[in-house]
Every structure is written in C-alpha cells, then in structure tokens.
Image (cartoon, helix red, strand yellow):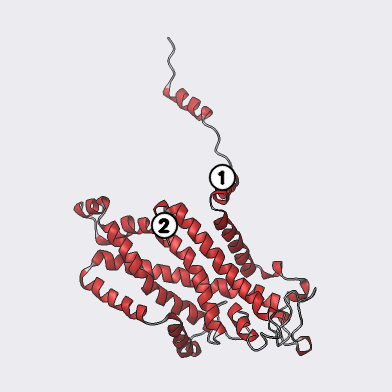
Amino acid sequence: MTTTSPQTSDQLTLLNTPAEPPIFLRIAGALGKFLIKYPLGAIGLFVIVIFVLMAAVPALFTPLASQSSDHVIGVHIADRFLTPNSTAWFGTNGLGRDVYARLIYGARTAVLIGFGAVLLGKGLSTFLGILSAFMGGWTDAILQRFVEVFQSIPTILFLIIAVVSFEPRLPAIGPLSSSMLVIVLCVSIDTGFQSSRTVRGVALALREETYVEAAISLGASNSRIMYQHILPNLFQYVIVSASLFVGAAVLLESVVSFLGYGVQPPNPSWGRELNDAREELARYPHLAVFPGLFIFATVWSFNMFGDALRDKLDPRLRGSN
C-alpha cells in the first residue's frame, strides 16, 4: 500500500487548481456583469469616465484650432455670436470665445469642485457622525446644535455670503482659484454638517451590534472601536452617498456661477456660460442649450451610477428613494 506524502498532496492540489485569470479579464468580467444588471448605472459610469478625461486631458476632445488658451479665454470681437459650424462646433459667445472649448475646459472646474467638496465633506460628515453617535452626552448635544444651525441656512445663501466675504482674502492654491477654493470649502462644510446626522443614525445602529458590545466588554478603547469596527461598516454608505453627492456639488457650483458669485471670468465654468447666455437667449439659444446639456449629463450620470452602486453594495436599499 502506497501513501502520499503531505508535500506531494499539496503539489497535486496546486496542479488541479485552475489558474486565476489576469486582472484585466476579471475587471472586464465585473464590468460586463455590471452592464447587464445595471445598464443605466453602466451608462452613467461611462459618462463619468468621459467627464474625468475631459478635465484631465481636455486637448483630446478639442480640435487643433481650439486647443490654444486664446480660444478659451481670449477676446475675438470679429467672431462674436457665430452659430455652430465646422470650426466652432457649438458656436461662439459674446466675446468670440469658442463655446465648445470653454465647456471642455470647464469640466476641470467641475471636477475640482465636485470631487474636492466630496472628499472634504464626506470626511467631515463621517468624523462628526461617528463622534456624535459613539460619544453621546454633551458631545452629541453640542454637535447636533451646530448641525441644526447649518440645516436652517439655505445652502445657496450660505455660499453667496461666503464667496463675497472670503474670496478676496484667500489665495489661489494650485489649479484652484480663490473663488473655487471658497466654493469647495463652503460646500464641504455645509454638506458635511448636514449629512453628518444621517451618518450618526447609521453609526447609532452599528453601536448596538453584538461585535461592538463584545469589543467594549473586552476593554477596547473608544478610538479603536470607532476606527476598527464602526468606520469599516460605514464605508459602503459613505461611498454610495459620495457618488450621489458629486453631481449635487457640480450643480451647486453651476447655480452659484450662474448667479455671478462663483468662478470668475475668464476662467471657464458651465454655470458662467449659462450666465453669459441670458441676455442673448432669444437670438442665440444654443449658448444656453449646450452648457445646460453638459450639466444635465453630468448630474444624471452621477445619480444613475450612485443608484446602481447603492443597489450593488447594499441590496436592502434596492428600489428606495
């Protein structure tokens, strides 16, 4: 009777185990399943990728004639209010600037503000929500009073007051102009405080879970419980909420710029393009149609992708509003 050594058995097991496919095949398979199960979410993800590429490499999307900064921020009185043509695909505005090129380069403004506000805002709301839920007592009471103050102030009014008050006092940081920096900070602070109440509710439910009670009984510190037990279980909610909030942040920036208090000229912004088109809307409606379509496509794509991501990560929320 022959026996197989443990080492030989392990070798046979390794030989019989199918090789793991390359990572790009696994990613393609996951994307294929996502497309079949969530077609609108997949379309939204595709639009988001295009949107990010516009911000990162705008020259890929503009013709050679529109790649120079002169067509984006220069003044060409002789080319004012041209209708869409083979050279200026979306026409030109009142200063002769290429509308298509300004919308492509304006994607960078939307990306910086949208993603910047999301990173700061969700970080703030997660920290405040966990701290308020776990500490309780006076900490919870004081933080919730601050939340109620921010909830009572209309976001648009808060942004306008902040831009007017702080823009002249803040320097530009890298690609962020002073007005963009104010918008990012104000949107993140306002939404961070407001959405922290929802995070607090989720954290309160997690605090009652058995594994948290077990950690407390074993003498784990508060910081350890919050970092290792509550925060990882909040991650799915934060990711889904962040994906939905990017579109809202882009829309907020467009609204403030439309009112004339956002990104200042000559920097391109979708809301600023809508603002510039108001006086000539009757004669040149294309000046407002194309920026509106860009804003609509961006907000819609983030909402569709966020809904699909919510259904994928937490099936209990599927179909909820």
Are there few (<14), some (14-19), or many (20+) residues within 10 Å of tag 2? Answer: some
Which of the 4 quarters of the picture holds residue 89? bottom right
Where 205 falls versus 287 (above or below)? above
Q: Amino acid at mark 2?
A: Gln
- Residue in the picture at 63% in, 81% down: 273
The N terminus lies in quadrant: top left
Q: Pinpoint residue 146: horizontal percent, then vertical percent.
A: 31, 78
Judge from the rendering whether residue 178 lies leftward or rightward of residue 221; answer left or right: right
Looking at the image, can residue 173 be seen? no
Identify the mark nearer the N-term, 1 or 2: 1
Residue designated by label 2: 236
The residue that appears at 44% across and 60% down in the rendered structure is 239
Expressed as whole percent of the image width and height from the top left, the position of residue 132 reads 28, 68
Q: Secondary structure at mark 2?
A: helix
The residue most toward the top is 1
x%, y% of residue 58? 67, 70
Give x and y (percent) for residue 281: 66, 85
Measure how far apart labels 1 and 2 are at the Cα level.
22 Å
Q: Is residue 62 left or right of residue 169?
A: right
- Give the label on residue 26, or none: 1
The quarter of the picture where residue 221 lies is bottom left
- Circle on res. 86: none
